[in-house]
Image (cartoon, grey):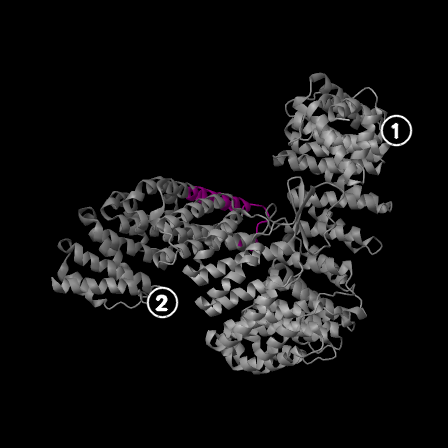
Amino acid sequence: MDQQSQLALILGPDPIPFETLVSHLMSSSNEQRSHAEALFNLCKQSDPDALCLRLAHLLQVCTQPEIRAMAAILLRKLLTRDDSYIWPRLNISTQSSLKSVLLSQIQVETTKNLSKKLCDTVAELASSILPENGWPELLPFMFQCVSSDSPKLQESAFLIFAQLSQYIGDVLTPFIKDLHTVFLRCLSESSNADVKIAALNAVINFIQCLTSSSDRDRFQDLLPAMMRTLTEALNNGNEATAQEALELLIELAGTEPRFLRRQLVDVVGSMLQIAEAESLEEGTRHLAIEFVVTLAEARERAPGMMRKLPQFISRLFAILMRMLLDIEDDAAWHTAESEDEDAGETSNYSVGQECLDRLAISLGGNTIVPVASEQLPAYLAASEWQKHHAALIALAQIAEGCAKVMIKNLEQVVSMVLNTFHDSHPRVRWAAINAIGQLSTDLGPDLQNQYHQRVLPALAGAMDDFQNPRVQAHAASAVLNFSENCTPEILTPYLDGIVSKLLVLLQNGKQMVQEGALTALASVADSSQEHFQKYYDAVMPYLKAILVNATDKSNRMLRAKSLECISLVGMAVGKEKFRDDAKQVMEVLMSLQGSQMETDDPTTSYMLQAWARLCKCLGQDFLPYMSVVMPPLLQSAQLKPDVTITSADSDNDIEDSDDESMETITLGDKRIGIKTSVLEEKATACNMLCCYADELKEGFFPWIDQVAPTLVPLLKFYFHEEVRKAAVSAMPELLRSAKLAVEKGMAQGRNETYVKQLSDYIIPALVEALHKEPDTEICASMLDALNECIQISGPLLDESQVRSIVDEIKQVITASASRKRERAERAKAEDFDAEEGELIKEENEQEEEVFDQVGEILGTLVKTFKASFLPFFDELSSYLTPMWGKDKTAEERRIAICIFDDVAEQCREAAIKYYDTYLPFILEACNDENPDVRQAAVYGLGVCTEFGGPVFKPLVGEALSRLNAVIRHPNALQPENVMAYDNAVSALGKICLFHRDSIDAAQIVPAWLNCLPIKGDLIEAKVVHEQLCSMVER
């Protein structure tokens, strides 16, 4: 039958066809379901009123609970404010029947799960229409339910409250007093656990939507009752309820930590008691720990609060240490085939490990190191291997957060670890090596510089542990961590010993050991560079043998790592030494590339990187291979992220997060799961494209037309920072390649118009991406890339493009200033302490990087457009003048001065109109205590002397005394001051040259000659010595 007749039947007087349609929507058969969906959508389009009334009718009369539930879900979706929102299309009578059916069903529905779904539907509709007063009956209904003696109605009302508070906080604010009474009564008096949890949920959601702290404080006295919900559930053995309560309290700790501040000692104390209670389920104890760690991490909202409780931190550390003891000596660990086999580790062990890391990062070394030095020695002195293991794992976990403090106590830390290298238990020796690897990363290069003579021999010794391949493989990995942060000078004396041991491991029967040895060799070669040449002939034959012979599926990773190692060794020893083998390796790569590889084959990503290294090593000789390399590389760069989207509160979480390869982020009410392997391959490919363009310059030209449209959209690829960073770095490289190819006549007949088109595509895209970029560090890179692009294609920019760049710069300065203001606000918090101050300082230094790039771009624009840029400079001056203020950092003042110097130098006479405003600042800055500021100021003074003519004349006297102070300063020739001195001498020379009639030449010229020659600033030296010649000629 045709669709119209089907519709008539479904929405007709007989209820059965509609009920069948709804049950088909739940069908497990795809075909049946998609047919039903099509019909349902048709009903929605053609007769939304009938459809909604039908669903409402099902809620009332249908006897099958699962169909009633489905009807509630379908209604909720129809009433959700998104593309399918149909409320405004319904007539008034349908709207009012829907509202009354929903409220009456909440009163009569008996199935618990279904009541919840009805509450969801009510909350969804109310969030859209309540703020415009579209449902006046709802709030009275909710208050009535809460005051009734039916636990079911109380729970329903609280469920609706919880979901609605973020939308209608303002509507509820007038009822704060009534709500407070209701909440307190239910939390204190209700005997029903479900009602209490629902009330707790409502309170916590409500507190989060209150904007004023005085309103929040009115709910402070609910906290003891809120905590009792948790303790009573535990005392009644109802751990499921307790876990729900804990999850809600964790949410509160993350979003409103200061609400807990006054009762912090009691709250944290109770949580630690739960964490210490061995009789409770692990899940409950882990949540209590999560609560305390979340509070420690809430530094944006409550900086320094948890550091005020050292006794609790010590207790928590002890709890986490005990969790690390929950590990068995599983035989599978010893016989494992791969490094990531973690047999014997329990969930307690993993939680302990993760929380130590988070705690150290959030509280910092001054808090954690004293606690660790108090507790770890007893673990190391004990007889059980688990305790030794736990102490070493803990050291490795806290190193990142405690790096600054641990670097001050390196001797103690290093000795603690190296003393356990000879422990009788292999898992302890493994943990000791693991700690050295982690410390090399977190405490480098200090550790490498001071302790290489103890650490490297210890690792070399561990490579001889042939009874325990896991220990050998891990020692090789630790060599990698150590050498990554190491200079060739330190490494070279140990190379003989290390390389010969690694060659022995390469011939080991265990693949894991071979892989570890390959990675270590690659890293050692990379860190020792040309010093590796003497080992080349011994090492390369082994590497090539693995590359050619490891063709089995089980050996894929081995082959991939041999590729990585060969290409890094080739780069280290250079083109001459590597050339002949390079040809053979390329042949293998080409045949690999031609073969069909499985999607999860690690070789792909290693191949992408190996090709790029070979290109770096061979330079232009690599061009013939580009046609083989580029197609698959472009394919990887164009990979679409593998994304699954569910709603954040849905029960079917993306197969929970144990799946290493999935990463989940929550955006608004959507939960997004992303396959990370795809993202990593994409990021690698984008980085490689950037590498080729950078290395091959004009030789990269033939690929620009494919690469630009691939990378430009990725400037806004928010799933993965590495992808964005690579796309950003590639932009100037692509422009440069095009410009060079056109200049050198290698552009296949294209001319400057092509460069202009490319520039018109890239520059606006960069400006737009900059506008939306959330990460400060990437903002700075984008500004840097934009600056390079303007340098390359400057004169090709048209006025509207310059306008958009200038507008974006205003935006960047404003955004940066407001971030600094927020930090200054944070510094006013009650518990703010020195550690928080350090953090803020680091964050502000990143802002300086942004502002530095702004200065560079303005300099480039002024150099490119000279005086025609001045109207834009005038607009910017109100943004720049504040940067001269005494309250600004030296770096900000220096950048502001440099911008003026550029304008004065490039625009010459046209810039004289700014002297009145800026020269007083410049003169004062000549004697700033910061040498970089002084240098910028005296340089600017020199520029104004040269181009200022009569306008500068009246200032000559003051200029002389300022310059004199710089030149005669007792430490003027110290390395940090010499650049300011040289620039001052240069400016003095310009006064002698351009304003001779305004000075006492007989006294000043000899004084100037006395300062020559200048040796620090080579550019200025050239200027000064030319001045001398022109004076001599006169």
Query: In the image, what residue type sits under mark 1?
Result: Thr
Image x and y of residue 955, in percent: 21, 49
Query: In the image, what residue type sits under mark 2?
Result: Pro
* Residue sitting at x 71%, y 68%: 554
Identify the image quadrant of residue 138: top right
Q: Between residues 243 and 875, which one lies in front from this camera angle?
A: 875
Q: Helix, strand, or loop for circle 2?
A: loop
> Which span of residues is magenta-colored?
808-837
Q: Using the rendered image of the protein, determine whether residue 429 is visible from the camera's viewpoint.
A: no
Image x and y of residue 572, in percent: 50, 73
Q: Using the rendered image of the protein, determine whether residue 755 is visible from the camera's viewpoint.
A: yes
Residue 824 counted in the magenta span: yes
N-terminal of the two: label 1 or label 2? 1
* Residue sitting at x 68%, y 81%: 464
Identify the image quadrant of residue 263: top right
Image x and y of residue 687, in percent: 53, 58
Label ID, residue 63: 1
Label ID, residue 975: 2
Mark 1 or 2: in front is 1
Q: Between residues 954 and 663, which one lies in front from this camera angle?
A: 663
Q: Between residues 443 and 832, which one lies in front from this camera angle?
A: 443
Above or below, 895 relative to 376: above
Q: Is residue 642 left or right of residue 59?
A: left
Label ID, residue 31: none
Specify few, some or many for label 2: CA neighbours under 10 Å numbering under 14, 14-19, or 20 or more: few
Image x and y of residue 511, in percent: 70, 73
Residue 839 counted in the magenta span: no
* Residue sitting at x 34%, y 67%: 974
Q: Helix, strand, or loop for circle 1?
A: loop
Q: Is residue 688 left or right of residue 506?
A: left
Q: Is residue 954 left or right of residue 334?
A: left
